[in-house]
Amino acid sequence: MSENSTEMRATESAEQSRWSMVGKDPWTMPIEKIDLSHPGIWHTNEFLPFLERLRKEDPVHFCAESAVGPYWSVTKYSDIMEVDTSPHIYSSEPTVGIIDSYEEYTLPMFIAMDPPKHDDQRRIAQPVVAPANLKRLESIIRERVCNILDGLPVNEEFDWVKHVSIELTTQMLATLFDFPFEDRYKLTFWSDAATAIPGAGVVNSNEERWAAMEECLQVFTGLWNERVNAEPGSDLVSMLAHGEATRNMAPMEYLGNIILLIVGGNDTTRNSISGGVLALNENPAEYDKLRANHGIIPNMVSEIIRWQTPLAYMRRTALVDAELGGKQIKAGDKVVMWYAS
Ligand code: HEM
């Protein structure tokens, strides 16, 4: 798909596109025509029965024609596990997104790399979210949650996503990067700009997106220069600047990995906090169970991620011919693991 058609998609209604599944009957339409790649049914929250039919009738499903080209949909746990744990067959390169990437608009980042480089770089950043570090951060997270909730307006309507989900995740991201706290909303903007479809509200064009990315690189290069000459610290910038697998990254790779970490920490947690609160309010009996027994909070966290699924899918590309769930995947085929299923 060209950049132009990507921009067109942003301006047309998600339901009106010729590729949209909105309004189609998931149970009676020809199964080979089911196409989960268009955002329409995700906007209108109609995607679940499509996934249910694929799980029941065709768990490794080929869609021959779509706005993003031909691709396989994998909708069952065991098949998803097989794909996700076989990087020698199913590669994360050149992209984990369903739309084929354009070299000029693609940043190298370790999520879109295969072992060994993927594992070496991931190992550098991983300690920041390891249980020991989260334990260290627990009191500050609790304090911030209380401050944010105590500061909410009472008896008046307010935007939960903006005032709670974005505020909390942005504050915590700033801490993970040891980023200047007063400038923290830049992190939110860079994350939103990196993932936005041009014209859909955050940036108007790819040029505007790149201007935001350049500003991000400039600011983070300043932080790198500060920290590379200091003693190794426990923030992500210092960890990357001192890590063996990351200390010699080219500027674009540094930017790519910074964007990966900002987007990874921003979108997912924002959406699971928001979707979780919505789900509890829509299911008052579940909310009552939780109020009566705080011991079930750990279960609630996993359940919210399952229920809300902040990341609907990841894509892989087959490196060799392979069999999956009785289907023949060919080298070069696009394979999409639908976690939302
Ligand atoms: C509700 C919270 C979160 C969910 C549901 C979530 C989900 C995911 C998923 C499904 C993947 C892809 C795994 C794969 O390709 O097999 C991923 C990768 C990643 N996430 Fe998260 N994530 C969350 C929070 C975070 C946070 C807070 C950060 C950083 C501060 C983060 C950073 C990353 C990174 C760096 C990767 C790439 C890992 C790799 O390539 O091995 N995520 N996440």
Image (cartoon, rainbow, N blue to C red):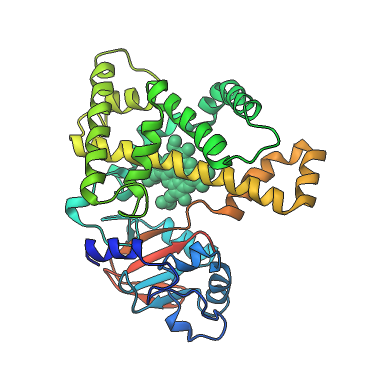
- Residue 171, position as x, y percentages in the image: 48, 28
- Residue 178, position as x, y percentages in the image: 39, 22
Name the image quarter holding the N terminus: bottom left
- Which quarter of the picture shows residue 179? top left
Can you name the residue that lies furthest to the top here?
230
Residues 112 and 212: in front is 212
Whether residue 178 is visible here, answered yes or no, is: no
Up the image or down, 298 lies above or below 171; here it is below
- For the point 41% across and 21% down, the residue is 182
Q: In this view, does 302 lie to the left or right of 202?
A: right
- Which quarter of the picture shows residue 215? top left
- Which quarter of the picture shows residue 89? bottom left
- Residue 23, position as x, y percentages in the image: 52, 77
Q: Is residue 112 left or right of residue 172?
A: left
- For the point 64% across and 30% down, the residue is 149
Residues 2 and 85: in front is 2
